Every structure is written in C-alpha cells, then in structure tokens.
Image (tube, rainbow, N blue to C red):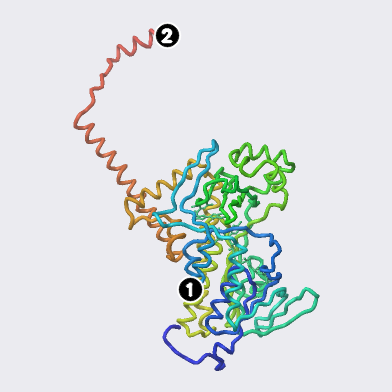
C-alpha cells in the first residue's frame, strides 16, 4: 500500500475518526498513546476500576522483564526514560545450584541488560501519559459485553448493571488472553485459532529485605533451575524480590500443609527458605491458588477495516522467554509503521498488519513453548550453565556469524521469525564445524598411526592354548 496518497474513505480525517481501544492493560494503554498522537478520537474502555485509585490489584505477575523491543516501543511515545528510571537493571542471571552455590552468567557485553519493572506502575504511567492527550478519553468500569463487526457498535456493562453503547470507526482489541473482542473472530469462517494450557502453574512469593537491604544481589535475574520445578526471582524498588515458582499442577496439589511446603523447599530450594522466611513461606504459599499459563495463536488479526487484535488477545505466550509484553509493545510499533506506509487507510493497514505480524508473533509463541519443554526436560543448574557458556563462547569467537538466540530475541529488533531462521542456520554451521573437527581428528589420527605403527606384540597361537588350559586347571 506504500506510495499512493489518497483521501481516506468517506473523506473523514483522522481527527474525526473514533478509535476504540478495548482493554486498558499494558498494551491498551500504550496503544492509546500511539493513536492519540496521530490525532484520532481515542476512547479506552477498561473493565476494571482505575488502578491508579490505590487498592491492591491482584492477578498477573507483579514484575516483568522489560527488554529492547519493549523499550523501543516506549521510546516512540517518549516514555522510555520515565519507565527505565524506575526499573532495576539485571546484567546477568544468577544460577542457584542445589548446594547453594551461586554462579552469574552475563546477558551480554557490558551495558547489555534487561530491566525488572513493576507491572502496576508501568500500567499507571502509561494510562497517565495517554490521558495527557486532549483527544484521548479513559472509560473505566466499562466491561465489553458484545460488539458487531458489521457496524462497529459495542455494548458495555456498567457496575450498576446498566448498558452503554458506542460506535467506532476502528476497534483495537487489547483485552488480553481471554479477549471478548476475539469472540466475534471465532464465529467467522477461515479464522485459525489454537489454545494450549501447559501442565505447569505458577505462584508468587515475596522475599523481604534483610536489615533494610536486598536479601540477594539486586542486579540479577535469580534462577533456580530444577527440571520440572523452577523458581525465578526479580528485584523490586522496595528492596523485595518477587519469586515465581513454576511447577506442575499435580505437584501443587500434593502440597496441602505448611509442613509440606517446608519439606518441598528443603528438598529443592533450601537456600531460599531463610530468605523468604519460614512463617512467610507457610502462609504466602496458600494466599492464592496456583495460576494457569496458556499459549494462544490465531490468524488473521483483523476483520475488514473495522477491528484488529494486539497484545495477548492476539497471541498469549507462556512466560519462558520473558517476551509477552515486549512482543505486545512491538505490535504497536509495527502497526504504527504500517499506518505511515498506508496513509492511515484502515482497509489497507489491517490486512498488511496481519500479513507482517502473524509470522513473528507465532514464532515467539513457539519459541517460548520450546523453551518451556526444554527447561522441563533437562535443565538443571549444571546444564543451564553449560549451554549458556557454549553459546557465549561461540559468540565471542565468531561475534558476527554466531549470535545466541536469546540475544537476538532480547537485545535486537530482528524479526522473531528471522531470528529463528538465523538460529537454524547457525546450528547447521556449528554442526558442520563439529563434523569438520571430528573428521579431521579421525583422519589425522589415522595418518599418525599409519606413519608410526604402534608395536603391538602378537602372541603365538600355541601360547594362547597353553593359557586357556592353565585357566581350566
Ligand atoms: P493484559 O495485561 O491482560 O490486559 C488486558 C486488559 O483488558 C486488562 O486490563 C483487563 O482488565 C482488560 N479487559 C479484559 N476483558 C475486558 C472486557 N471485556 N472489557 C474491557 N476490558 C477488558 N512479559 C514480558 O515481556 N516480560 C516478562 O518478564 C513477563 N513475565 C510474565 C510472567 C508471568 C507469570 C505471566 C503470566 C506473564 C508474563 N509476561 C511477561 C506477559 C505479560 O504479562 C503479558 O504479555 C502482558 O500483560 C499483555 O498485555 P495486554 O495488555 O495484551 O493484556
Ligand atoms: C519467567 C517468568 C532464564 C519473568 C528463560 C532465561 C521469565 C521472566 C530465559 C517471569 C530463564 C528462562 C529470558 C530473558 C526471561 C534467561 C530469556 C523468563 C523473565 C531464554 C516474572 N527470560 N524471563 N531466556 O536467559 O531470554 O535468563 O516472571 F529461566 S528474561 Cl525460563 Cl533475557
């Protein structure tokens, strides 16, 4: 669609068009900024109350790892600095072995790091930023009930039980993994959809400060890899850590008493017990039931020129690559760039967005699932350390040719599907390299043996017979 400058359909200019962003979560709030910046009449509809009005918001993870793609998306609406300044840099992972040994593995070169950010704060800052545009309006306590792909008419349920309707030129579905917007997609022909729950659940525990200081080194993503069981801890500004325990639901069900919890931690995460605290562990553990994790893929992401899905509503990924939010934020950049290329003509932008973005979002969903399967299968602390070292050594030896997959995913904006292709190619090169080395060793060895044959004494056959006879005696 690039190149042709035409008047948009109906002759409406962007400032006359209503864009409804459904969902005021991380991606919805950021998207509101992107659309408001272009001059559209932006209406954000969020089912919950305004999260800035205090109250504790429970549910999803407390903190998140923000990396390059997410930062780039924030920087385009001038929000990068604000968020980064309240993030805690994590330069390395810290691998906790069963015996309590801690080993750091850097994420990359000096200055390459990811950030631990507070989800609630990030969401609040983005809502506040969106509200600064006079043409953006927030509608909290508006739960989408239903909508029509033909007319763009939406109905919302209010807390008092009343209904409210609004018609929009474009509806942007940012209403998360259990999207109401997506329900209308499911009724249509040729809409592909898949949803997979993994057998693992997750549970969050807080590690308090010790004498006013972080209980562990703060600038690390702490990992306790134990095959089927895994724990991860990210630092918070209040000097606590949020620990996330990943474990199969079967195993969660086996732990029913405080003593069971202690026994379990004693066996798998003994070094974390004094840091979380025995009493806190026994009560925190049962505060909330273990949460499920789902992977969702679909396509297309749009209906005609009326509606588009972004963020988790289009692609929920399991959290084993730390990319869910980052990918959702990158969706906003990709859409914005296509808006420029197609002169904001929704009938051209939406199909182009689907064409460009689906392969990449499907790839990150696959990569995250692949990482889950791999970690569960054989990742203990030794394997984790070994694999990451091998990757990094190869990168050090051939910095241009061989870049670890997590580096491409975390620290670049190489399209996810291209990063995967490149990884396949690199693995071929590495395997060929190994083959050359092995062949070389065999040929070289053979040559040396041929040139300097070892003097192996041959034993006359009579002597063998004698020995056998003596054995019989
Ligand atoms: P959500 O954050 O789910 O927001 C959806 C919003 O829509 C909500 O506010 C909801 O109230 C609203 N809504 C829903 N239905 C309706 C309706 N009918 N009407 C109106 N509003 C509605 N990602 C990372 O990048 N890094 C990480 O380290 C990371 N760690 C994670 C750890 C865990 C344990 C989990 C579960 C996820 C993690 N993620 C991470 C993924 C990240 O949380 C999601 O990708 C991100 O929250 C998606 O944002 P979203 O705005 O699309 O959806
Ligand atoms: C899980 C839950 C380490 C936050 C994947 C690494 C995660 C995060 C890794 C959560 C792991 C796993 C990567 C980052 C990140 C690693 C990554 C996972 C943040 C391959 C709040 N993962 N996560 N990989 O490399 O690329 O450190 O809850 F244990 S950040 Cl599972 Cl980079």
| Foreground disc of the pair 2, 1 | 1
Mark closer to the chain start, 2 or 1: 1
Label drawn at residue 76:
1
Observer-nearest of 216 and 246: 216
Does residue 240 sit above or below 101 in this rendering? below
Q: Is mark 2 within 8 Å of ligand 2?
A: no
The answer to whether residue 102 is left or right of residue 178 is left
The location of residue 315, given as percent across then percent down, is 58, 66
Does residue 355 sit above or below 167 in this rendering? above
Residue at 68% over, 41% down: 278
Question: Is residue 300 visible to us here?
Answer: no
Secondary structure at numbered mark 1? loop
Q: Quadrant of the C terminus?
A: top left
Observer-nearest of 150 and 245: 245
Residue at 51% over, 74% down: 77
Taking the view exactly as shown, the residue that stands out farthest to the left is: 451
In the picture of the structure, the residue carrying the numbered disc 2 is: 472
Residues under labels 2 and 1: Cα distance? Answer: 88 Å
Residue at 62% over, 63% down: 120
The answer to whether residue 457 is left or right of residue 173 is left
Q: Quadrant of the N terminus?
A: bottom left
The location of residue 465, given as percent across then percent down, is 34, 12
């Amino acid at each position: 669609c690039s190149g042709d400058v035409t008047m948009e359909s109906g002759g409406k200019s962007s400032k006359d068009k209503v864009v409804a962003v459904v969902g005021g979560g991380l991606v919805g709030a950021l998207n509101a900024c992107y659309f408001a910046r272009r001059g559209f009449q932006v209406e954000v509809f969020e089912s919950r109350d305004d999260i800035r009005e205090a109250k504790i918001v429970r549910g999803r993870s407390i903190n998140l790892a923000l990396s390059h793609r997410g930062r780039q998306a924030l920087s385009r609406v001038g929000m990068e600095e604000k968020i980064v300044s309240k993030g805690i840099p994590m330069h390395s992972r810290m691998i906790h072995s069963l015996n309590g040994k801690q080993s750091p593995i850097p994420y990359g070169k000096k200055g390459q790091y990811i950030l631990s950010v507070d989800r609630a704060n990030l969401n609040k800052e983005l809502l506040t930023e969106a509200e600064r545009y006079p043409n953006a309006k927030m509608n909290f306590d508006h739960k989408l009930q239903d909508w029509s792909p033909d007319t763009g008419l939406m109905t919302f349920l209010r807390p008092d039980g009343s209904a409210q309707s609004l018609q929009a030129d474009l509806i942007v579905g940012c209403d998360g993994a259990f999207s109401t917007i997506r329900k209308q997609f499911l009724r249509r022909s040729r809409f592909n959809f898949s949803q997979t729950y993994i057998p693992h659940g997750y549970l969050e525990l807080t590690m308090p400060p010790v004498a006013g200081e972080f209980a562990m080194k703060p600038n690390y993503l702490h990992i306790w890899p134990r095959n089927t069981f895994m724990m991860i801890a990210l630092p918070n500004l209040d000097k606590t850590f949020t620990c996330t325990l990943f474990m199969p639901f079967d195993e969660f069900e086996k732990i029913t008493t405080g003593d069971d919890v202690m026994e379990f931690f004693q066996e798998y995460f003994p070094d974390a017990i004094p840091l979380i605290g025995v009493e806190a562990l026994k009560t925190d553990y049962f505060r909330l039931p273990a949460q499920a994790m789902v992977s969702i893929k679909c396509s297309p992401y749009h209906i005609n020129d009326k509606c588009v899905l972004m963020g988790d509503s289009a692609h929920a990924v399991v959290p084993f690559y730390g990319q869910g939010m980052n990918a959702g934020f990158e969706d906003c950049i990709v859409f914005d760039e296509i808006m420029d290329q197609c002169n904001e003509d929704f009938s051209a932008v939406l199909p182009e967005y689907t064409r460009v973005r689906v392969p990449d979002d499907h790839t990150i969903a696959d990569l995250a699932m692949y990482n889950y399967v791999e970690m569960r299968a054989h990742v203990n602390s030794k394997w984790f350390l070994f694999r990451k070292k091998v990757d990094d050594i190869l990168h050090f030896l051939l910095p241009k040719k061989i870049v670890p997959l997590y580096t491409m995913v975390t620290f670049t904006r190489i399209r996810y599907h291209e990063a995967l292709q490149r990884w396949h190619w690199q693995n071929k090169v590495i395997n060929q390299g190994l083959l050359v080395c092995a062949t070389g060793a065999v040929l070289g060895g053979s040559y040396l043996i041929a040139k300097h044959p070892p003097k192996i004494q041959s034993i006359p056959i009579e002597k063998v017979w004698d020995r056998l006879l003596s054995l019989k005696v």
